[in-house]
Image (spheres, coloured by chain):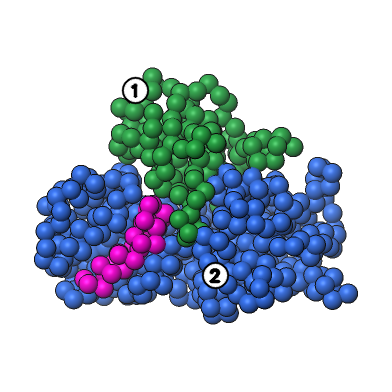
Chain colours: A blue, B green
Amino acid sequence: MVHKNIICPVCGGSCDDVQIDLDTKNRTIDVQNACKMGNAKFQEVVSNHRLLKPTIRENGKVKEVSWDEALEMAADILVNARRPFFFLGSETSCEAQEVGLHIAEYLGGPADSNATICHGPTVMGIQESGMVGATAGQAKNRADMVVYWGVNALESMPRHMSKYGVFPRGYWTKRGRFDRTMVTVDPRVTPTAIASDLHLQLNPNSDYELLSALFTILNGREPHPSVEEITGIPISVMKQTVEMMKESNYVAIYVGLGVSSSYGKHRNIEIALNLVKELNNYTKCNIGALRGHCNVAGFNQLASYLYGYPFGLDFMKGYPRYNPGETTCVDLLREKDVDAAFVMSADLVNHIPADSAKYLAEIPMVCIDIAPCPTTTASDVVLPGVIDAMECDGTFYRLDNVPVYFEPFTDSPFPETKSNEDTLKQLFAKIKARKEA
Amino acid sequence: MQALLNTGSTIDEGRLAKGGNKYSDEYTKECAVCWMCAEDFTSLGCPEKVSVTSRDGKHTIAVYSKVTEAMKSGQVFIPRSIWANIVVEPDTFSTGSPRYKGSPVFVEPTNEEVLSAEEVVLKLYMGGE
């Protein structure tokens, strides 16, 4: 049966035009409009490696158990911990994340999400400077200059250029690519850089200096000559870039981890945001982050709405605290500051540095996931995950913080649970029963 | 050779990760790879495999080498994965985000075996369980 306008639960683009033809009898799925990553994820519905049975590790051996046994052991691990850590991944719904946050609050543990190892510094930069933002549709319709700074959009958000950024025909950019100038700032010659009109191949860790120099030129001053050696970009090219920006009708800047993960971190973002504010004295300009997961923005929205902070929350004192560097995932694990972990819909062991990952593998860990991965290997309890936007409904927040409600095209394969939200509610009930007994 | 490490997505890294194939040979061949320019590759003696060591010398991982025009001399790239994260520095400058980009590393030729993602977890993180 063919289903149209399915939301893709992979990257922050959360594409809303995927077409599915699911053949449940022959266990095949035909996917139209999705990128390579999206297609691969949709194939998980019929894949042979899908995790379908809960497992626990007992005396070093992994064994399959009933759903109830796995939940009981998960509840035991979290209730018996003095400081359980909750990593509420971003390839699941806000509804599931909300239950996870409430469990963290109830047990007095820290809670974090992929934002912390993704655009956490971007969010901190926004807290410092504020942000001139726009929806992806506004940028599509208006922008005649597009800047990808520290992001390889063609490989990290493959449809961004064709759906919003460069190629689509907008209301004010009727000729699509021909009405847009595209600039990429990246130390590598990426496919995105090759597709650009201008590639600024800056030296690694020199984003702050380059942004400062652009700011100086924008204000009519001459940057210090040493900036050429530091950034690897001639001042004449910097001036050309600033002129191109000023002469454009609307500049859309998209930043990636190249800005927020390089030295300078949130300060890089802060000065980029200030440059955008200044540019609005000459033309219209907005900035946005290309977010890596379909609902990584959702956790920031949800945690800010519920508890006042966008990530790295700590409920140890009975009220939410936020101190990046202390209450954030990598730091908590590196400093061995937690003694059990719950990881939902994120392969955390794969994506954090060795010191933190090694400690995570040492402490009791419960995870929810759909396929074998380093986190399931290192977990003591593995609960099979339900795939959001395919097997259950819910809400994602897209890269531009627009909420997207998604509906399933098939059912959860598990009679015991309808969604990850449902699984967490069952877990929460068992945790409460233990604490209140 | 000392170099600055950059990590990030590749389209096939994304395809394999999102498709649940992190334990496949294809994923290892795509991600356990150190990209470098021809000049650096030649200066290392054109090795098939290299060991990448973190700045503090605490962590080392063997990966395949790849020559590409995408890189400048003195810079290497490993697709974001468990291999790259072995040598990514865990300090976060009080932001929560480790140094995924721009950390100094040491790159040398090696004959060590390139571990699969599962072997990295079992041998390096779980003490050989």
The answer to whether residue A65 is above or below residue A102 is: above
Q: Is residue A53 visible?
A: no
Q: Amino acid at mark 2?
A: Tyr
x and y percentages locating residue A195 in the rendered image: 27, 50
**Residue at horizontal 39%, vertical 28%?**
B1
Mark 2: secondary structure: strand
The answer to whether residue A398 is above or below residue B4 is: below
Mark 1: secondary structure: helix
Q: Is residue B125 visible?
A: yes
Q: Provide the residue designation for mark 2.
A: A322
Q: Amino acid at mark 1?
A: Thr
Quarter holding the N terminus of chain A is: bottom right
Label 2 in the same subunit as label 1: no
Q: Nearer the viewer, residue A201 or A235?
A: A235
Residue A366 shown in magenta: no
- Give the main secondary structure of the magenta stretch: helix
Q: Provide the residue designation for mark 1.
A: B42
Q: What span is colored magenta in the figure?
A: A252-279
Q: Nearer the viewer, residue A428 or A393?
A: A428
Quarter holding the C terminus of chain A is: bottom right
